[in-house]
């Protein structure tokens, strides 16, 4: 097994001159033993037999390569994307067939047309009677293209035909953009008023009576500062414009085409016109020469129609360019600028001023909002200072008075032993039970006083009457629901009424039950 050196060999035909470096080579004696030791691997008998068996198999014939390796590879990649035979490609170029090859394909074909040297090699290979099928695909393509006269020029003419209308449309669009920008500048009344304000401001600062200034001076307004080192002349200009006419702040709306036009170089329009005119001349010279495809009357009419269309479009584009040059000259005269000033310079200066003006406007609006906030805060402070000082009322006086817990304790001690005495709420069978509130309340004083008197006389305890909301509100303990009497004391006597309780005194004197089945003594 032998290592190989992968190089690109030079065809014999290319070594022509006697003074070539490859002619008269000095014999070199190589040490084959050392060479084989380094780059030849000896195989055992079994592997050797397998290798010989593989070598004995008939191998496919290798393609003949006549071109440089890299160029051959790039050509093969390019032509593989064109789904046409090599003969169809050649006929499409000769006949200028529409929509057969797109612009990108044609540009690639220009690059991979055979050179004079390659054409000589390919024709010699064919004249020697060699098998053309043994050639690689790039060689076959170039050999087919050798049958076409003025190969590169014809492909370039076809490229011109494919891209002409797009080029003219782009050229006219750019020209119209510059024309619109010229109209914006000359017809904007807001720009004119703003320039007048700047002129008056500059004359007041400089104490002079100038009649005008250059557009380049607009870019210096943001650099000149007041003595507070914060406010620039441009900031002050924004305030003046807002005071004079608030619509002047949006003067940029009148100059919508200025920014796009600032990227146009008008001299490039002339260059593009010259390029298209040269392409038209080349087209007429190449396609009509030695071309059997245009011998028919129909083909000639189609070709002449295209040529006339090209010449008319070029004439209109040239007139349009001359028109915008004249309009731009009027704009320079309107602004009293240097006649040598280019459209790109003028529109770029205006666009930069618009950007600086917008930034200054944002700053002024933020500063004005901050000043208004500070003024409002100061006004509020002055208003508070002007009011007479009064002693603030205590929050404690606004709270409801709390009842004393001592009274609750006194009632609790007197009523504790009688709290569970059996008695009933008075009602008859044909009467509905009294409605009582569900929230806990303290027994009113009218009941507890009667209980106290009967305790002294030893008589029976009277039955309590129904307790109403008015009784609760008149009670001296109203508002007290719980009293903390310490660890060794019991809570004050409280009555918790159950909402919609159906408790009545029966004839037998038993304790009645409510709907839930619970027993309720008269004193709860």
Image (cartoon, grey):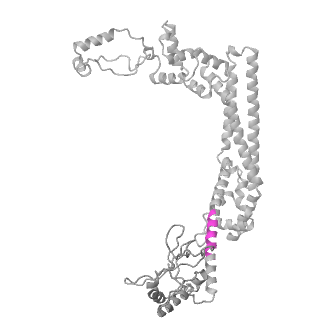
Quarter of the image where the N terminus is located: top left
Give the residue displayed 64% in from the left and 69% down from the top: 368
**241 on left or right of 121:** right
Extreme residue toward the top, this view: 129
Please indicate whether residue 391 sits to the left or right of residue 308 in the image. left
Quadrant of res 376:
bottom right
**In this rendering, does residue 387 appear at all?**
yes
Q: Residue 325's x, y, as percent?
A: 74, 44
In the image, residue 237 sits, relative to residue 215, either above or below, namely below
Residue drawn 53% across the image and 89% down it: 450
**Farthest front residue in view:** 508
Q: Count the marks: how many?
A: 0
Q: Position of residue 133 (x, y in %)?
A: 49, 10
Residue 42, placed above or below residue 197: above
Q: Choose between 251 and 83: the one closer to the eye.
A: 83
Q: Quadrant of residue 392?
A: bottom right
Q: Is residue 289 magenta?
A: no
Side (left or right) of 424 relative to 280: left
- Identify whether 194 is placed above or below 2: below
363 in magenta: yes
Q: Residue 195: in sight, yes or no?
A: no
Q: Residue at coordinates 55% horizontally, 24% vertically from top-left?
A: 81
Q: Tell me where residue 252 appears, x and y as whole percent.
A: 70, 56
In magenta, the rendered stretch is 362-375
- Of the pair 272 and 477, the residue shown nearer to us: 477
Is 218 or 431 nearer to us in this picture? 431
Q: Nearer the viewer, residue 359 or 367?
A: 367
Report x, y in % for residue 218: 66, 60
- Which secondary structure class fits the magenta region best? helix
């Amino acid at each position: 097994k032998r290592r190989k050196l992968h190089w690109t060999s030079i065809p014999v035909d290319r070594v022509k001159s006697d003074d070539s470096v490859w002619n008269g080579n000095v014999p070199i004696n190589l040490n084959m033993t050392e060479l084989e030791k380094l780059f030849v691997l000896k195989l055992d008998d079994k592997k050797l037999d397998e290798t010989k068996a593989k070598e004995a198999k008939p191998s496919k014939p290798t393609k003949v390569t006549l071109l440089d390796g890299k160029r051959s590879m790039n050509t093969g990649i390019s032509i593989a994307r064109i789904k046409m035979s090599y003969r169809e490609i050649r006929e499409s170029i000769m006949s200028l067939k529409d929509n057969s090859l797109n612009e990108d394909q044609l540009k690639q074909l220009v690059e991979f047309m055979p050179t004079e040297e390659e054409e000589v090699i390919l024709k010699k290979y064919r004249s020697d009677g060699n098998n053309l099928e043994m050639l690689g695909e790039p060689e076959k393509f170039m050999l087919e293209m050798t049958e076409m006269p003025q190969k590169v020029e014809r492909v370039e003419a076809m490229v011109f035909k494919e891209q002409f209308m797009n080029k003219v449309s782009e050229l006219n669009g750019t020209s119209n953009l510059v024309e619109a920008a010229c109209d914006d500048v000359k017809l904007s009344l807001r720009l004119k008023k703003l320039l007048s304000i700047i002129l008056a401001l500059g004359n007041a600062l400089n104490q002079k009576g100038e009649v005008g200034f250059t557009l380049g001076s607009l870019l210096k307004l943001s650099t000149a500062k007041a003595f507070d080192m914060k406010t620039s002349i441009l900031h002050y200009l924004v305030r003046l414009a807002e005071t004079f006419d608030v619509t002047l702040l949006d003067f940029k709306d009148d100059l919508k085409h200025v920014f796009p036009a600032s990227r146009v170089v008008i001299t490039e329009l002339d260059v593009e016109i010259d390029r298209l005119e040269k392409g038209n001349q080349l087209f007429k010279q190449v396609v009509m020469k030695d071309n059997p495809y245009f011998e028919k009357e129909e083909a000639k009419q189609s070709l002449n129609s295209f040529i006339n269309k090209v010449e008319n479009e070029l004439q209109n584009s040239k007139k349009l360019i001359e028109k915008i040059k004249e309009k731009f000259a009027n704009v320079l005269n309107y602004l009293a600028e240097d006649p040598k000033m280019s459209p790109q310079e003028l529109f770029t200066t205006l666009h930069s001023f618009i950007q600086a003006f917008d930034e200054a406007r944002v700053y002024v609006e933020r500063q004005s909002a901050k000043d208004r906030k500070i003024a409002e805060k100061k006004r509020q402070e002055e208003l508070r200072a002007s009011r007479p000082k009064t002693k603030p009322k205590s929050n404690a006086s606004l709270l409801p008075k709390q009842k004393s817990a001592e009274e609750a304790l006194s009632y609790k001690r007197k009523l504790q032993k009688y709290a569970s005495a059996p008695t009933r709420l008075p009602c008859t069978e044909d009467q509905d039970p009294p409605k009582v509130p569900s929230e806990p309340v303290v027994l009113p004083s009218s009941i507890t006083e009667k209980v106290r008197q009967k305790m002294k006389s030893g008589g029976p305890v009277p039955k309590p009457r129904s307790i109403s909301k008015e009784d609760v509100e008149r009670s001296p303990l109203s508002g007290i629901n719980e009293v903390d009497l310490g660890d060794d004391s019991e809570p004050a006597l409280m009555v918790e009424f159950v909402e919609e309780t159906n408790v009545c005194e029966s004839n037998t004197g038993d304790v009645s039950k409510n709907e839930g089945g619970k027993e309720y003594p008269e004193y709860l």
